Image (tube, helix red, strand yellow):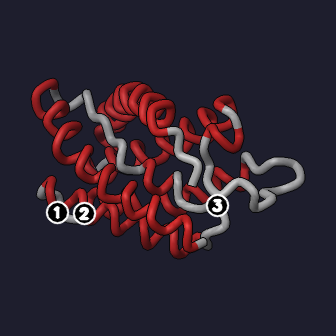
Amino acid sequence: MNNSIFPNIWRFFGLVALQVLLLQQITLSIGPYFNILLYPLFILFLPIQLPAPYVVLLGSLIGMAVDFFYGTLGLHASAGAFSGFARSVILATFEPKGGFTGKEPIASPAHFGWRWYLQVASYFFVAHLFWYFSVMDFTFVYFTRITLKTLSGWGLTMIFVVLYSALFNPKN
């Protein structure tokens, strides 16, 4: 497990920097329906065998880091914590028949293939984005707006998820 600490530390800082320096600027320049949230990949790429409470804690930690730069008080931390919980449920749903063997340290296309990875990432990001926009608007009066933002954000985010995963090919 020690060999998986450093890649996760680099991924944490790299994704926060990418989110804050580039992706936030894209959202601000294009409009509120064009949100790209790539930092949850840190949560998805945490070791599969890591217990859920630690994943929730690390999810809220990366969310707090993004909140610090976005000026949102707890919005991303809430979404990160929720995603940490949802990750456990989603991975249990898509668990291979024999279970996870431990040979696959993270949920990535290098270990499970692109089809499995895209299914898991799709559900994961829909859950994250829906929670994020629900907390942002904080009322179901805006359910249509929340849904439209979730769907548009999901489409854009998945493009960047595929690009990130293809370019960096995470294995640890």
Do the residues under discs 1 and 2 have CB atoms within 8 angstroms? yes
Secondary structure under the numbered disc 1 in the rendered image: helix
Work out whether mark 1 precedes mark 3 in sequence or the reverse, and give the earlier one. 3
**Which of the two residues, 102 or 118, is positioned nearer the viewer here?**
102
Do the residues under discs 1 and 3 have CB atoms within 8 angstroms? no
Q: Which residue in the protein does label 2 denote?
A: 65
Where residue 68 is drawn, which disc sits there? Answer: 1
In the rendered image, residue 35, in percent from the top left (x then y), is placed at 27, 34
Quick one: label 3, few (<14), some, or many (20+) residues within 10 Å?
some
C-alpha distance separating marks 1 and 3: 28 Å
Q: Which residue in the protein does label 3 denote?
A: 48
Examine the image and state in which quarter residue 76 appears. bottom left
Where residue 111 is drawn, which disc sits there? Answer: none
Q: Nearer the viewer, mark 1 or mark 3?
A: 3
In the rendered image, residue 171, in percent from the top left (x then y), is placed at 58, 48
**Which of the two residues, 59 or 46, is positioned nearer the viewer here?**
46
Quick one: label 1, few (<14), some, or many (20+) residues within 10 Å?
some
- What amino acid type is highlighted by mark number 1? Phe
